[in-house]
Image (cartoon, grey):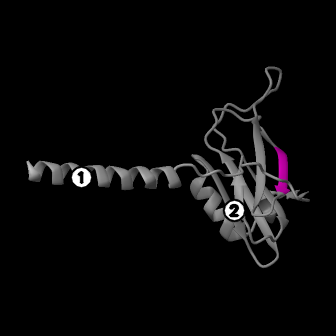
Amino acid sequence: MEVKMRRLRIILLLLGVIGSGLLFTGCKSENTDVKKIKDLEFTVVEDADVPEQLMQIINEKKKEPFKMSYSNADSLYIVVGYGEQPTGGYSISVDELFLTSNAVYIDTNLIGPSESDYVTNSVTYPYVVVKTEFIDKSVVFK
């Protein structure tokens, strides 16, 4: 009988400790609002002006959708690729590029060809390379 009471006390004590731990750590409030500090000026870079090392990486990745950033001493390059598409005629819009206190946010959109567009019937790999000032922050893709 004494052994059963001792086990019951240990179990209740453990449940109390675990419950207290969950109570204090499980109710964390986090502010997920993104507060824009400023819009960033940017340039969409043509293939001929993309740094050679970055172009090699793009060519390796372009068959599948990808998102990446690349920086050198004075510029930040942000690349969004949409993978293999069945035809030509695709374009990409850069809807937002802005700075927050802890990151650079970018939002892009793949725009398909309209029904009236004349397009090539060969596989394409649409991507966009955006160049902006060097900022030592992580990039968030929306």
Q: Residue at x 75, y 72 (%)?
A: 136
Q: Is residue 137 magenta?
A: no
Q: With 134 as the anchor, is 120 left or right in this view?
A: left
Residue 97, percent from left and from top: 83, 53
Nearer to us: label 2 or label 1: 1
**Residue ranking furthest to the bottom:** 73
Dot 2: within a 10 Å radius of its alpha carbon, few (fewer than 14), some, or many (20 or more) residues? some
Q: Residue at x 70, y 69 (%)?
A: 52
Q: Is residue 97 magenta?
A: yes
Q: Are marks 2 and 1 in contact (CB under 8 Å)?
A: no
Q: Magenta stretch? A: 94-98
- Position above or below: 48 against 85: below
Residue type highlighted by circle 2: Ser
Say which residue label 2 marks: 69
Q: How many marks?
A: 2
Query: Does the rendering let one see residue 39?
Result: no
Of residues 76 and 37, the one drawn nearer to the viewer in this rendering: 37
Which quadrant of the figure has residue 58? Answer: bottom right
Residue 95, percent from left and from top: 84, 44
Q: Residue at x 83, y 46 (%)?
A: 94
Say which residue label 1 marks: 9
